[in-house]
Amino acid sequence: GVGKSVLLKCLIGLIKPDLGTIYIDNKLINSMNFKQLQAIRSKIGMVFQFGALFDSLNVSENISLALKKLTKLNKDEIRIRVDDSLKKVGMEKTEELMPSELSGGMKKRIGIARAIALKPSYLFYDEPTTGLDPIMTDEINRLINKFQKSGDVTSVIITHEMKTVNDVADRVIMLNAGNIVYDGNSINLHETNNVIVQQFITGNSILI
């Protein structure tokens, strides 16, 4: 509730910040028009908290939608890109399924497939493991690590789950009441004496 998801939406230009400036690839996005923002967004793959799949479109159509709008790929190239993305997240042969036929974990993986289909320079994840059981949480974390290590991509992950922080993060920034209370790696995070940080990572409500 401190604005993590709002921050992510500001980064992709869905919301304009009241104060401050945002640069991506050394370009100021605050005052960009729609066409300029679309050019930046074509470099960004976004994984939304609850999948954000269109209920009226099947899996293939959900993934290909952004490819049609943000790339110049032809029909056959889009089909190949969709198939390749689904294979990378272990969701082969689901192209014709509708979102209503997918479990929560499957929707998350389809959401990741849609994000990586653009072959982005940046991958933004908004609470990628929310609502998932521990096994599927581990699977999603493994996928995040897989794509982070397999190409030249920067990942920004919004999460409040410490397992995800411990499993995937190189750098951790913790926010509290609009302020940064920690900025460092996940190892030192556990060693900090900051009471607010310790309360969060231990789940102890009486530390303060």
Image (spheres, helix red, strand yellow):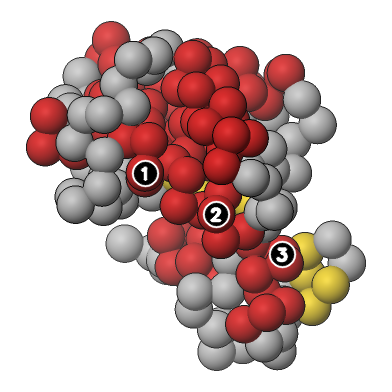
The residue at 62%/82% (across/down) is 34
Please state the horizontal and vertical placement of residue 189, each as a whole percent of the image. 58, 32
Residue linked to disc 3: 40
Please state the horizontal and vertical placement of residue 70, each as a whole percent of the image. 62, 58
First in sequence: mark 1 vs mark 3: 3
Res 81 visible: yes
Q: Residues within 10 Å of mark 1 (few under 14, many from 20)?
A: many
Q: CA distance from mark 3 to mark 2?
A: 16 Å
**Residue 128 in which image quadrant:** top left
Q: Amino acid at mark 1?
A: Glu
First in sequence: mark 3 vs mark 2: 3
Query: Which one is in front, 201 or 61?
Result: 61
Residue 68, which numbered label? 2
Residue linked to disc 1: 61
Query: Does 182 appear above or below 178?
Result: above
Q: Amino acid at mark 3?
A: Ile
